[in-house]
Amino acid sequence: MSRLKFRWIIALLLSVSTGCGGELGERSVQSEGGLYIVRYSPDVDPVPNAILFGLDVLVETAEGEASDVTALEFDATMPAHAHGMQTRPEVESLGNGRFRVEGLKFHMRGRWEMRFNIDGAAGADFAVAEEFAR
Amino acid sequence: MTRALAALALATAACGPGDLARRWTPEERQLIESLAIDGPMIPPPDPTNAYADDPRAAALGQALFVDTALSRDGSVSCATCHQPERHFTDGLRVAEGLFPGSRNTPTVVGAAFSPWQLWDGSKDSLWSQALGPFENPLEHGFSRVDVVRIVWTSYRSQYEGVFGPLPPMNLHHRFPPQARPDPTDPDGAANRGWQTMTEEDRAAIDAAFANTGKALAAFQRRLVPRPAPFDRYVRDLVAGRDRSDAMTEEAIEGLALFIGKAECISCHDGPRFTDDAFHNLGVPTNPDLFAPDRGRVEGALGVLDDPFNCWSPLSDAPENCAELRFLDPTFEDFDGAFKTPSLRDVARTAPYMHAGQFATLREVIDFYDELPGEPPVGHREFTLQPLELSEKEKDALEAFLHALSGQPQPARVVP
C-alpha cells in the first residue's frame, strides 16, 4: 500500500470517527507528522479545471485546538506532469485556525496535490491532500 | 430480394440502437460531451469594459476594424492581419503590418473567452490588446493622438453617442500629430510632442484611446466559435442516435486518439480546446527571426506593467482583477512558453505555432510525434513525450482537427 493511500485511509477514518461532516468537514487530511488535521472546502466542487477558485480552510491540532494554529502556507502541484500552478495563491488568516486561500487555478485536468505548511504551538508540520480537477 | 434483405439485416445489425454510445466508455463519453457546443458560444462578461455588450460600440468597432486611415501611411487596418475571409488571420508565418513582426497572427474569433490575449499573454483584455498595434512601429505605426483625431474626424457622432464628448482634436497646438509616450526614444518627435501636452489633455487622449479599444473589443467579442461537425456528432451521441453522419470514421478514430493515446486533451481541453495556460513545447526558432522568443516570461511582466491593464484607471472594474492579482510572473516554466491556442476552426488558421513554424496541421502532428531538437529557450514541458503514431493514426488525428471547423463567421456581425 502506498504511503499516500495509507494517509488517505487515516484521513477517512478520522473524518468518520470525528463526525466532521459539518461546515468545513467535507474534506480533511492529517498532517504528515500527525500534529494537525486540515479540513478544507473548495468554492467549486468538484474542483474545476482552468478556472480560478478558492478554499476555506480550518486547521486544528490533533487534540482539536484550532486556536493553537498560527500560520499556513499553501501550494499545489501536478506530480504526473511535474509542474505547479501558473498562479500565486494568497492565504489570509481569519483567526482561530481558519484561513482563506484564494487564487488557485488547476490548469489541467487530473490529479493535483495540495500542500499545506502549518505552524503553531504544536510545532511545524505539513499536510498533503489530493484533488482531481475536472 | 433475399440478398437485399440480408444486406439490410446486416446493416441494421451494424447500426443497432446505441451503437454511437457503445463506442465509448462512460468516462470517454463524459469527456467528449464536455468539449461540445450546441450553438454559437457566448463570451463571458468583461467588467473592465462597460461597453462590451453595447451594440452601438460594436458597430463603431466594426467600422474602425477595417479603416486603414488608422495607420501612419493609410495602408494598415486591424483587418490587414485579421482578415475575415481567413478566419481573422493572414495566412503568413509572422504578421506583416507596415513591416514584418515576429509572431504569427492569432485569430480574433473566440479571443474574448481567454483571460490572456496574444501568444505571450501580455494583454489581459480585448480592449487593451486592441490598442497595442496602433502604436507599434511594425504594425500601424500610428500614435494615440492620431487615432483619436481620426475618430474625431470620421466617427465623432458615433463615438460621442456612446462614450460622450471627444477632446477638441481640431486644436492642433494642444494635440500635436504623432504624439505618444515613447520611453524608448525620449528625445524623438513622438515623445516630445506628448510631453508638450498638458496633463489633462494627455488624460483625455488616453481615455478616448481606451474607449476606441473598447469599441473594437465590443465588435471582436461578437466573433465567436460556431458549431462544427464534431459538435453535431456529439449531439447525435447525446440524443442516443444509432448513427451519425457528422464525422467520418477516420475523424472519430482521431477523436479517440485526441482524448487517448495522443493526450492532446491535456492542454487542448474544454469547448474551446484550450486551457488558456502557457507551455513550452520546444518548437524550433523561426529561422527568419534574430533571437529566440522567451514568450510568457516577458509577457507576464508586460501585462503587470501595462498602463491599460485591468488595474488601470481606464479599466471599468479595477477592483475586479483576479487573474492579474494571482498571476505568478516567476513561474519557473514560463521561459519559452506560449499560450495554448484554441483548436476550434484550426484548419482555417495555418500556419501554426507562435512564429508560424509549421505550414500545415500535418507538420504540427509530425512535430508532436517526434519532438525533435532541444527548445531554443527554457525547457520542454516535461509531460511531452514522442507520440509514436502510425501514418494512419496521424491521418485520423488530422481528420478530427478538420472536423472542428464550424460554420463560417457572418460577413457582418453587427447589422
Image (cartoon, helix red, strand yellow):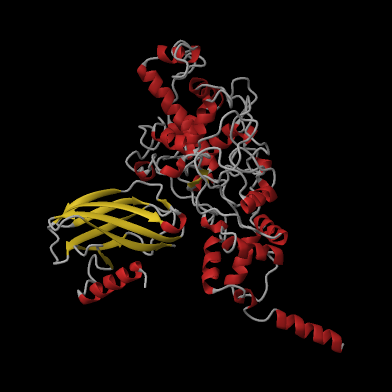
- Establish if A82 lies above or below B317: below
| Count of labels in the image | 0
Quarter of the image with the C terminus of chain A in it? bottom left
Closer to the camera, B374 or B311? Answer: B374
- Residue B108 horizontal/vertical position (percent): 57, 42
Q: Viewed as shown, does residue A76 lie left or right of B89? A: left
- Residue B152 horizontal/vertical position (percent): 51, 23
Q: Toward which corner of the image does residue B35 lie, by quadrant?
A: bottom right
Q: Viewed as shown, does residue B15 lie left or right of B199? A: right
- Residue A34 horizontal/vertical position (percent): 21, 65
- Residue B193 seen in the current view: yes
- Establish if A67 lies above or below B337: below
- Residue A122 horizontal/vertical position (percent): 14, 58
Residue drawn where x is 41% and y is 59% of the image:
A48
Residue drawn where x is 45% and y is 24% of the image:
B166
Q: Viewed as shown, does residue B43 lie left or right of B196? A: right
- Residue B408 seen in the current view: no
Q: Residue furthest bottom?
A: B2
Residue drawn where x is 38% and y is 47% of the image:
A87
Q: Toward which corner of the image does residue B301 lie, by quadrant?
A: top left
Q: Residue furthest right?
A: B1
- Establish if B226 lies above or below B125: below
Closer to the camera, B87 or A131? Answer: A131
Closer to the camera, B272 or A17? Answer: A17
Q: Toward which corner of the image does residue B72 lie, by quadrant?
A: top right
Quarter of the image with the N terminus of chain A in it? bottom left
- Establish if A69 lies above or below A6: above
